[in-house]
Amino acid sequence: MTVLVPASRFERWATNFAARHGGSDLVVRDGHLLGRAPDGSTFAARQPFATTYAGAADAGEFGAAAVPPGEWGVLLVRKGGFAVALLAGADVVESKVGQRHVQGRTKAGGQSQQRFARRRDNQARQAYEAAAEHAARILGDHRGVVVAGGDHGAVDEVLADPRLRFTVVGPWLPVPDPRRSVLEQAVADASSIQVEVVNAPGTPGAPGSS
C-alpha cells in the first residue's frame, strides 16, 4: 500500500514503523529512503515533486529535505469542475476553483440518446475549455512542476492547450469534484512524502492478518 505522510510527521512515522516491526534498518538508494524490519516488512519513501534525496540514511533528515519548490502548481480537473493553484513554497499565490454542470448518463435510446450524448460532450468540452483558460492565466508563464489529479482524460484534455508548458509530476491525486477544501487537501498531499509499505505476512496491516 502507498501512504502520503506530511514531511513534518515523517520521522514519527518511521519511528512507529520500527516500533511495530521490531526495528528498522535504513538505507538511501536511488534517491529514496528504504527501510527493512527484522520481520521482513519494508518501506520505500520518495520525496515529493519528483526530487531525489542524497543525504544520510536518517528519517529526520529525510523529512526535513522535503521542501516545496520556490514555485509550483496544482491542476485538478473532472467533468464536474476544476481547481488551479500557483504556489510559492507552502503559500498559495493565486488560485481558482470552478464548477461546471455536466449531465449524467441516460438510459434513453435512439435519437434521444444521441442528442443527449452530444449535449453531454459539449458541456464537458466547455468545462475543459474553462479549466484551460484559468490554467493558462494562472500557470501559463510557469515553467516549474505541477501536480495534477482528478480524471486522467479530463486533465489530458486541458493539458492539450499549447499555452500550458509546465512539467507534471507525481503523485497523481485521485480527487472528487474539486472544491476549495479539495484543493487545500490536494496541496497538502502534493507536498507529502510518498511511502510504499509492504507488511510481511502475519504482521499488523498485512493481507490476511487479524
Image: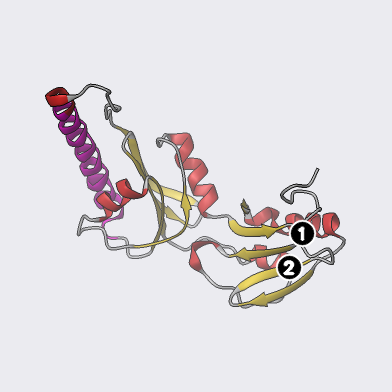
Q: Is residue 97 visible from the viewing direction of this image? A: no
In primary-sequence order, the first of circles 2 and 1 is: 2
Q: Nearer the viewer, residue 126 or 10?
A: 126
**x and y, in percent, of residue 98 in the image:** 32, 35
Q: Nearer the viewer, residue 144 or 45?
A: 45
**x and y, in percent, of residue 18 in the image:** 82, 60
Residue 67 in the figure: left or right of residue 157: right
The residue under label 2 is 35
Residue 115 in the figure: left or right of residue 81: left
Q: Residue at x 49, y 46 (%)?
A: 186
Residue type marked 2: Gly
Q: Residue at x 28, y 31 (%)?
A: 100
Q: Nearer the viewer, residue 130 or 118?
A: 118
Identify the magenta region: 114-141
Residue 7 in the figure: left or right of residue 164: right
Which image quadrant is residue 33 in?
A: bottom right
Task: Indicate the secondary structure of the residue bearing disc 2.
Answer: strand
Q: Which mark is residue 44?
A: none
Q: Residue at x 27, y 63 (%)?
A: 165
